[in-house]
Amino acid sequence: MNQEFLFLLLLIMVGYVFKRLNLLKEKDGEAMGRIIFNITLPALIIVTFDTVKIEPSLLLLTVIVLIYGIISLCLAWFVFRKEAKELKGTLLMLAPGYNVGIFAFPLVQTIWGAEGLAYFGMFDAGNAFILFGIVYIIASYYSKEGLTLKPRIILKKFGTSIPLMTYFIVSILNYCHLHLPSAVIDFATILSKANMPLSFLLLGLYLNFKFEKLYIKPMIKFLLFRYGTGLLFGLILYFLLPFNEMFKYTILIGLLLPIGASILPFALEFKYSTTRFIGTLTNVTIIISMLILYLFANFIL
């Protein structure tokens, strides 16, 4: 297990070193991210859900993530209620979503294989509804222009999210005991193998810790809130839920994952001035969550 984590860290470092040597630039990450979200991640979802049976209880993972997302937003609103409007909106955007596809999937695949991917896939389905629905509305509401959204815009966000639509389609196929043609699965398998290296190269490409000193206090406050709340609810659900260990591990670890990868694009779309703060905080949560997963894999499993 230590060797696998070392390889993943090396992939992050390769991405970072290539950026420092100007062999790759941060703007290249946009194209790489589109490849991951629209090609390799959907391919991995297709392969995973074709080989693993979805139990009815797994649907509860999606529901739990949705409910927890709403609860964490309410708590975040109370904790950060005295912050300036734009910073408050930024912190509320960052509170409920998680980076599952790029960060968690490669690590989960290394630790638990296809079974773990199925559980975290259902977790990510609920996460996608929070990110592309509630978080997107918050981003618009706290922007300088104020709320400008219409229901069709939100529906369009859902409909154009290829990972979310892939989850939806393969879940229905799995539940109905239907399988895609073997040629499709074979092709998706080839594509899915690129998801892990591309994801961690992308994390290295975006690795950056430059930020303004005025954001140090809200950053520490946010990190204590996010990981403290996630750990508290994760442990409560772990000991109370009457499901198998994999189900409970998914909740416990899932609530301690890094900030959602779509937050920065939302901030850019609505012209927030806190984009560097979001980028730095994203990197910090990646390091913290990777350390948590490393400790979990080596001392708990």
Image: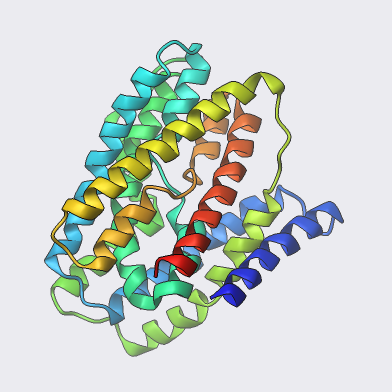
Q: Quadrant of the C terminus?
A: bottom left
The percent coordinates of residue 62 (x first, y second) are 24, 52
* Residue 161 position (above or below residue 67): below
Q: Which quarter of the figure has residue 22?
A: bottom right
The percent coordinates of residue 160 (x first, y second) are 39, 50
Front residue (pair 82, 240): 240
Outermost residue toward the bottom in this view: 182
Front residue (pair 48, 178): 48
Residue at 30% x, 54% y is 251
Residue at 45% x, 22% y is 89
Residue at 39% x, 51% y is 161
* Residue 161 position (above or below residue 278): below
91 relative to 229 in the view: left or right: right
Q: Which quarter of the figure has residue 119?
A: bottom left
Number of on-image labels: 0
* Residue 284 position (above or below residue 251): above
161 relative to 151 in the view: left or right: right
Residue 273 visible here: no
The percent coordinates of residue 102 (x first, y second) are 51, 58
163 relative to 222 in the view: left or right: left
Q: How is the image coloured?
A: rainbow
Q: Which quarter of the figure has residue 247?
A: bottom left
Residue 111 visible here: yes
Front residue (pair 234, 177): 234
Outermost residue toward the right in this view: 21
Residue at 38% x, 33% y is 135
